[in-house]
Image (cartoon, rainbow, N blue to C red):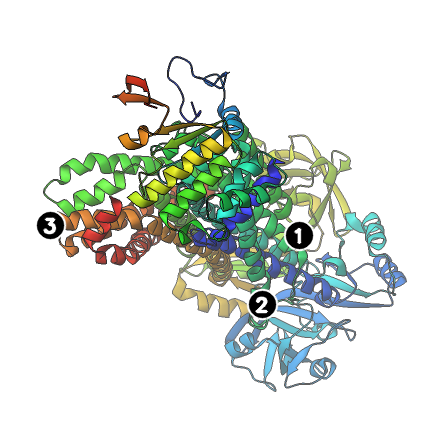
């Protein structure tokens, strides 16, 4: 539903739009306008500072005050003093916080997180999860998270369990 | 909008510095530097020739006649346009000292010589003093050969002279073109009793003109040609004072720039490989940008701008080197050049080199850049290119085709020779194609052979890595192969030319070529040769010079489309009965004793080129007299054996009474040559003998010089190829380190791994050498067969050098990067991969 993969059959409808009929550039624009993606391995651009990394999706969307908004976003994730640092100068936890700021900066309607704590120790992992849920609540986005950790899944509103590529169970999380 | 964002992203990517771009920059810089340097040297020589044009010519303008002095009407016209007119006479003769004889190119001058510039003598003295009272000056090489020093006597024809000084330098030496002997200068008046300037002997006269300031050279030239062209007048002026030399320099320069282009093509392979490797390392960044919403156009523009900036940087380095090195080494280059040169920074060759650099960079980076379109955002989740498309989208292929056409068009424009450019471009493209196919075959063969190498792990590993997908085989074969192909072609062409001149020609060519035999001397001359058992054959023929002015009543220039036969005057002959050995291809030879209207027998090959047919009429101007004859036969004339061959022969009666001399070729045993020459020269001092072996040596020396210059050009190609090899070896270092770590873990010793690495490089180098040799032999054969129209045989010593060179270059580059791979600790490498 992020438009990252091509479907071999069937159809994918996200936010009311049919993704399977879109070409690559249309999918890129769809992601730019609607999706924020957080990866397990952060995928920050190594030649850009934290500020530039966060500003990138805003620049691509043609936002006029991209850098001011990016700076505010970094302040919000507690990295106000690290804005001019390059990824290689930051810890894994810090890099993932930059990635979170980058994903939420364009105010996407969907936040897609792929094992966001998979490469982090427990303390950092916990902090990142708190931040992710905070961002979801603050900006009213839908958070879709892929995880192997049951305690993280338990914090979600709805859990879909996949096994060998098929939906095994789906349930509303206990309130 | 997209471009602005792409520029910003590109500038951020440039923060990564030059890592991964060193070979890219070196290849571009070297290719551009070579082209810029050759262009700068050529521009320097052209400027020098232009600056000294008048001095090189010996006057503001010059008119030349062959075989005669200017007539009164011509002299009248020359004196009417010039402030001063200086007459010089140019011909070959023999300088004689006792029994010693040396062929010399004589310049007989008047009191006004030289009109412009000065003659430098050793010991220093005015030329007028040196030439007074039957004095003469000659170049050191001839004086040494004859054992002469200033004050000693020598003889020209039947006139004695005294050598007054050695001729160190004279102003008009570059304009004379190809001379067969060292120069001697004497006064024309002093030759009146020498017997050397009789009617019918071979000489040319030059009238150097000192024109009033502001004289309009184009108008004067037009006027001269209008009045006197059909009388055999040739005009040159200071706009192109160096004549043939300037044209020669221009042609050699154009050729070397084209050789330089092949260097840029080899560099292009390295450029392309560097960009591909760089972009492969950027796959995650590109996929991330796509995830964040960047379109394909934004991605392409980002990396196009980044690589474009780096390419411009490389081109600038090349331009600085190409312009700077010739200026820096100007004193050394000037000292080795026989002609003047002005070394400074010239804009034209730099613009040319920059255009070549930009086009080559575009051509070789566009393909890998276009492949960024294949990187999909999903790559971030698993390593894979989205599609297995081998060709980039059509819009990039069309652009690539357009760029290649533009490059060839630019090369044709800059070199001024479409023929040479298209041959070179075809050669480069053909070689690249052959090398790509060869690389595919080499990999296929390596995969097949791998199974037969079981039990020999070092060889099996080497074959395995050569045959592997995405291995080094293609880039090694391409980079090393193209450089070696150029070198192999030059080696084969040079070797074949040297062989045909030094081995084959002397075997069939005569020992001596003799000119200026007077009609009353021919019987005695023949008698001397006929009585000598050492003489196997002697051919004689009368020779006159004439200008073909009309064909079928029309201007010959127009009718023959400017063919070389109608350019200026030609040697012509006459004969009574059909000479033995004459091969008539059409028509019939005139009957013996024929004295009707003039008949002409013409060379078949030239007649075909000029579109002549039997029955056509032709007007020949011989010494001011027009003779119109009908072509009644065509015959085969061969030039290959350096025998006597005349394009045009008339019946004897048509030329009866015209003053002329005879020429002869003598085929004799080598040990008898000296005695024959001594006897003939003593009996007939006016005769000039040209030893064919000496002439052949001069030609060999000239060819050797051109081949050496071409080899320097090819060497740049090879150095660039070596750089690309280093790039390929460096790119493969990580894979080799991993491979070494795995093999060590499995129990392979460092020695065995090293042997495997060395074998792989040596085998690839050997294969590249073999392919290059095949392509080089093919190129050499094509040039010898279709351009030189002569036989071809493989020159094996040159061929072996190419293969050894390929093995050495590849092994050195490969092993240079093997040490670090071998030294790495397996545990560290294998853990890092996990």
Taking the image as shown, residue A124 lies to the left or right of residue B332, namely left
The residue under the point 51% across, 50% down is: B14
Judging depth in this view, the residue of B684 and B375 nearest the camera is B375
Residue that label 1 marks: B544
Closer to the N terminus: mark 3 or mark 1? 1
Kindly indicate whether the residue at mark 1 contacts the one at mark 2 (C-beta within 8 angstroms): no
Are labels 2 and 1 assigned to the same chain? yes
The residue under the point 31% across, 32% down is: A152
Residue B89 spot, x, y in % from top left: 71, 66
Would residue B65 be visible to someone looking at this image?
yes
Q: Is mark 1 on a helix, strand or loop?
A: strand
Kindly indicate whether the residue at mark 3 contacts the one at mark 2 (C-beta within 8 angstroms): no
Q: How far apart are marks 2 and 3 (CA)?
A: 62 Å
Q: Residues within 10 Å of mark 2 (few under 14, many from 20)?
A: few
Kindly indicate whether the residue at mark 1 contacts the one at mark 3 (C-beta within 8 angstroms): no
Residue B224 spot, x, y in % from top left: 82, 53
Taking the image as shown, residue B475 lies to the left or right of residue B105, namely left
Judging depth in this view, the residue of B381 and B808 nearest the camera is B381
The dot on residue B747 is 3
Residue B806 spot, x, y in % from top left: 32, 51
The dot on residue A133 is none
The residue under the point 73% across, 65% down is: B51
Q: In which quarter of the image is the C terminus of chain B?
A: top left
The mark lying in front, picked from 2 and 1, is 2
Q: Is mark 3 on a helix, strand or loop?
A: loop
The mark lying in front, picked from 2 and 3, is 3
Q: Which chain carries label 3?
A: B
Residue that label 2 marks: B337
Quadrant of the rendered structure where residue B111 is? bottom right
Would residue B98 be visible to someone looking at this image?
no
């Amino acid at each position: 539903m992020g438009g990252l993969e091509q479907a071999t059959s069937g159809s994918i409808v996200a936010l009311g739009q049919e993704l399977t009929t879109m070409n690559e550039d249309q999918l890129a624009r769809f992601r730019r306008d609607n999706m924020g993606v957080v990866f397990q391995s952060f995928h920050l651009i190594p030649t850009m500072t934290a500020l530039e990394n966060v500003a990138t999706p805003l620049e691509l969307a043609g936002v006029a005050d991209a850098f001011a908004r990016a700076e505010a976003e970094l302040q919000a994730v507690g990295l106000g003093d690290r804005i001019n640092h390059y990824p290689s100068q930051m810890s894994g936890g810090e890099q993932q916080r930059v990635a979170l700021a980058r994903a939420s900066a364009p105010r996407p309607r969907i936040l897609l997180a792929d094992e966001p704590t998979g490469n982090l120790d427990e303390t950092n992992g916990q902090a990142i999860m708190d931040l992710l849920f905070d961002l979801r609540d603050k900006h009213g986005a839908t958070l879709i998270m892929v995880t192997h950790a049951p305690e993280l899944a338990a914090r979600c509103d709805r859990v879909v369990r996949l096994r060998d590529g098929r939906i095994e169970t789906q349930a509303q999380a206990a309130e | 909008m997209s471009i602005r964002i792409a520029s910003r992203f590109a500038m951020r990517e440039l923060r990564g510095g030059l890592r991964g771009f060193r070979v890219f920059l070196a290849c571009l810089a070297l290719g551009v530097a070579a082209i810029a340097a050759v262009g700068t040297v050529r521009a320097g020589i052209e400027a020098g020739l232009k600056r000294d044009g008048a001095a090189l010519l010996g006057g503001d303008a010059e008119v030349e006649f062959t075989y005669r002095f200017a007539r009164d009407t011509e002299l009248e016209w020359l004196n009417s346009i010039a402030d001063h007119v200086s007459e010089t006479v140019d011909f070959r003769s023999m300088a004689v000292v006792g029994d010693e004889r040396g062929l010399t190119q004589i310049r007989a001058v008047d009191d006004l010589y030289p009109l412009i510039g000065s003659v430098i003598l050793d010991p220093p003295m005015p030329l007028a003093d040196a030439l007074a009272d039957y004095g003469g000056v000659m170049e050191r090489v001839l004086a040494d050969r004859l054992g002469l020093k200033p004050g000693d006597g020598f003889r020209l024809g039947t006139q004695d002279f005294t050598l007054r000084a050695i001729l160190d330098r004279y102003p008009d030496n570059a304009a004379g073109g190809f001379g067969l002997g060292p120069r001697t200068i004497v006064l024309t008046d002093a030759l009146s009793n020498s017997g050397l300037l009789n009617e019918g002997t071979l000489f040319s006269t030059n009238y150097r003109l000192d024109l009033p300031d502001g004289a309009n050279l184009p108008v004067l030239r037009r006027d001269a040609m209008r009045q006197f062209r059909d009388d055999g007048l040739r005009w040159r002026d200071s706009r192109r004072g160096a004549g043939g030399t300037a044209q020669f320099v221009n042609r050699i320069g154009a050729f070397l720039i084209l050789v330089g282009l092949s260097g840029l093509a080899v560099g292009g392979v390295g450029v392309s490989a560097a960009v591909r490797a760089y972009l492969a390392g950027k796959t995650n960044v590109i996929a991330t940008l796509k995830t964040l919403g960047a379109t394909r156009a934004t991605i392409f523009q980002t990396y196009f701008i980044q690589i474009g900036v780096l390419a411009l940087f490389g081109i600038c380095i090349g331009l600085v080197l190409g312009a700077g090195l010739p200026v820096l080494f100007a004193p050394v280059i000037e000292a080795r050049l026989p002609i003047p040169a002005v070394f400074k920074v010239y804009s034209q060759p730099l613009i040319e080199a920059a255009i070549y650099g930009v086009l080559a960079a575009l051509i070789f980076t566009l393909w890998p850049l276009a492949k960024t379109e294949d990187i999909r955002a999903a790559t971030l989740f698993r390593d894979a290119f989205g599609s297995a498309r081998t060709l980039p989208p059509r819009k990039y292929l069309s652009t690539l085709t357009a760029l290649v056409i533009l490059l060839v068009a630019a090369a044709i424009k800059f070199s001024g020779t479409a023929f040479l450019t298209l041959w070179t471009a075809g050669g480069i493209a053909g070689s690249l194609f052959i090398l790509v196919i060869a690389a595919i075959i080499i990999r296929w063969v390596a995969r097949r052979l791998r199974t037969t190498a079981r039990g020999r792990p070092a060889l099996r590993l080497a074959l395995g890595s050569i045959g592997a997908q995405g291995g080094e085989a293609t880039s090694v074969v391409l980079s090393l192969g193209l450089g070696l192909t150029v070198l192999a072609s030059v080696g084969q062409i040079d070797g074949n030319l040297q062989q045909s001149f030094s081995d084959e020609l002397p075997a069939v060519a005569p020992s001596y070529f003799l000119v200026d035999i007077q009609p009353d001397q021919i019987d005695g001359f023949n008698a001397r040769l006929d009585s000598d058992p050492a003489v196997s054959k002697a051919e004689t023929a009368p020779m006159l010079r004439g200008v073909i002015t009309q064909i079928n009543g029309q201007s010959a220039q127009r009718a023959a489309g400017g063919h070389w036969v109608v350019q200026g005057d030609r040697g012509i002959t006459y004969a009574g009965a059909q000479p033995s050995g004459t091969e008539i291809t059409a028509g019939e030879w005139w009957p013996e004793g024929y004295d009707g209207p003039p008949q002409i027998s013409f060379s078949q090959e030239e007649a075909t080129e000029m579109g002549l047919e039997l029955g056509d009429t032709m007007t020949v101007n011989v010494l001011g007299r027009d003779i119109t004859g009908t072509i009644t036969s065509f015959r085969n004339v061969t030039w290959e054996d350096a025998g006597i061959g005349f394009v045009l022969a008339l019946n004897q009666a048509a030329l009866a009474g015209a003053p002329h001399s005879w020429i002869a070729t003598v085929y004799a045993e080598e040990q008898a040559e000296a005695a024959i020459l001594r006897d003939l020269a003593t009996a007939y001092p006016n005769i000039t003998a040209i030893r064919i072996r000496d002439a052949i040596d001069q030609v060999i020396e000239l060819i050797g010089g051109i081949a050496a210059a071409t080899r320097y050009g090819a060497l740049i190609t090879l150095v660039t190829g070596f750089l690309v090899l280093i790039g390929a070896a460096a790119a493969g270092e990580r894979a080799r380190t991993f491979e070494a770590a795995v093999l060590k873990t499995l129990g392979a010793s460092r020695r065995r791994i090293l042997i495997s690495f060395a074998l792989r490089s040596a085998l690839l180098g050997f294969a590249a050498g073999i392919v290059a040799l095949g392509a080089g032999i093919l190129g050499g054969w094509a040039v010898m067969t279709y351009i030189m129209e002569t036989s071809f045989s493989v020159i094996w010593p040159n061929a072996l050098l190419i293969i050894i060179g390929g093995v050495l270059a590849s092994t050195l580059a490969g092993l240079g990067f093997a040490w670090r791979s071998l030294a790495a600790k397996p545990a560290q490498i294998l853990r890092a991969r996990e």
